[in-house]
């Protein structure tokens, strides 16, 4: 009988391999690594996390990725780099002492203050995150400075190579040169690898294809979907501020997002029962949590909650 995979204490090592080619030992290491890094990320999450994953910004990043024919992983990696950079920028902004004699007129929020300070640089900061992500991708070509300048000129953003380098360095320093962050698509792909190993009868190619579309939809409709999930979790139409703050780690839980994406794709392919139980076994996430996430997503895919058959 083939070995079945699930989280258990083990050594943790990650290496880049193509989808469908990982060995049992590598998958075991991948799983442990994902679990540990996800938990570490949740412990370090702040109230600013998630608020910076704006629909228009994510759409902009995904469009750049598509236009430059980069691997989708690059786009999702860039989103994570951008959020970490902006969170650090906001935290530094908050803790910076106010200069003597400075005006007492405060913006509506720290996000507004940071936006006012960065609004002219923001498009270039976004592009720098994409460029940095492309340099770390194993399955995509790197965006060199000539290509970068040409592309930016084509979208009416005239910059020099020197300005481009300065922007990239600013992002690198803001991230303290820590670029090796995991993104949602990595979680989805590794969980699919394990699912395919444990349940060979699951049609992986169509499931993989649907997962890409589902993840993109969730990324773009993130605010609405997590708002629905928050209301489901709290059983309140208007959750309190305290409940919203306590819910932040849920919005940053890439493991939950990964199983949720696969569950929705499985529902579309009519493979729900076959897949969800195995996902729960692999990740130790309860079937109820997976079901709640999938239902919150399907409500927005369909558009009308009554049109979605209750999941069980």
Image: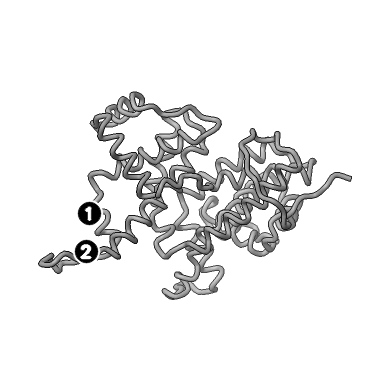
The percent position of residue 209, horizontal first and vertical second, equals 62, 37
Element class at badge 2: loop
Q: Quadrant of residue 287?
A: bottom right
Which of the two discs, 1 and 2, labels the residue nearer the N terminus?
Answer: 2
Q: Tell me if I can see residue 168 in this picture.
A: yes
- If the image is split into quadrants, where does the C terminus sit? bottom right
The percent position of residue 211, horizontal first and vertical second, equals 60, 43
The percent position of residue 132, horizontal first and vertical second, equals 42, 37
Type of colouring: one colour
Left or right of 115 in this view: 301: right
Element class at badge 1: helix
Q: Which mark is residue 116?
A: 1
Q: Tell me if I can see residue 276 in this picture.
A: no
Left or right of 51 in this view: 116: left
The residue where tag 2 is placed is 107
Check whether the beta carbons of the residues at disc 1 and disc 2 lie within 8 A of each other: yes
Single out the residue that lies furthest toward the left.
101
In the image, 152 versus 155, the foreground residue is 152
Residue appearing at x 66%, y 46% in the figure: 30
Left or right of 125 in this view: 59: right
- If the image is split into quadrants, where does the N terminus sit? top right
Residue appearing at x 38%, y 51% in the figure: 85
Left or right of 238 in this view: 36: right
Is residue 162 placed above or below 298 in the rendered structure?
A: above
Q: Quadrant of residue 156?
A: top left
Between the C-alphas of marks 1 and 2, the distance is 9 Å
The percent position of residue 309, horizontal first and vertical second, equals 65, 58
In the image, 245 versus 162, the foreground residue is 162
Is residue 274 placed above or below 234 in the rendered structure?
A: above
Residue appearing at x 27%, y 28% in the figure: 153
């Amino acid at each position: 009988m083939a070995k079945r995979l699930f989280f258990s204490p083990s050594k943790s090592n990650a290496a880049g391999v193509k989808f469908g080619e990982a060995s049992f030992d590598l998958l075991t290491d991948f799983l442990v690594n994902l679990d540990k890094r996800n938990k570490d990320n949740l412990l370090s999450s702040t109230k600013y996390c998630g608020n910076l994953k704006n629909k228009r910004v994510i759409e902009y990043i995904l469009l750049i990725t598509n236009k430059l024919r980069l691997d989708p992983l690059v786009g999702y990696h860039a989103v994570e780099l951008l959020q970490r950079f902006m969170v650090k920028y906001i935290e530094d902004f908050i803790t910076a002492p106010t200069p003597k004699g400075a005006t007492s007129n405060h913006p509506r929020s720290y996000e507004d203050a940071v936006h006012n300070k960065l609004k002219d640089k923001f498009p270039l900061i976004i592009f720098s995150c994409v460029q940095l992500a492309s340099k770390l991708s194993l399955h995509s070509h790197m965006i060199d400075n000539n290509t970068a300048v040409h592309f930016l000129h084509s979208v009416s953003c005239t910059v020099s190579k020197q300005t481009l380098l300065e922007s990239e360095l600013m992002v690198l320093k803001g991230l303290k040169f820590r670029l090796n962050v995991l993104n949602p698509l990595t979680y989805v792909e590794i969980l699919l690898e394990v699912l395919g190993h444990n349940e060979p009868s699951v049609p992986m190619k169509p499931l993989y294809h649907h997962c890409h579309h589902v993840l993109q939809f969730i990324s773009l409709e993130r605010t609405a979907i997590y708002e629905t999930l928050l209301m489901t979790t709290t059983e309140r139409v208007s959750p309190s501020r305290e409940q919203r703050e306590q819910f932040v780690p849920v919005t940053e839980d890439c493991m939950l997002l990964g199983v949720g994406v696969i569950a929705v794709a499985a529902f579309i392919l009519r493979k729900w029962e076959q897949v969800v139980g195995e996902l729960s076994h692999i990740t130790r996430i309860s079937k109820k949590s997976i079901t709640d996430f999938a239902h919150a997503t399907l409500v927005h895919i369909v558009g009308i909650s009554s049109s979605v058959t209750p999941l069980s």
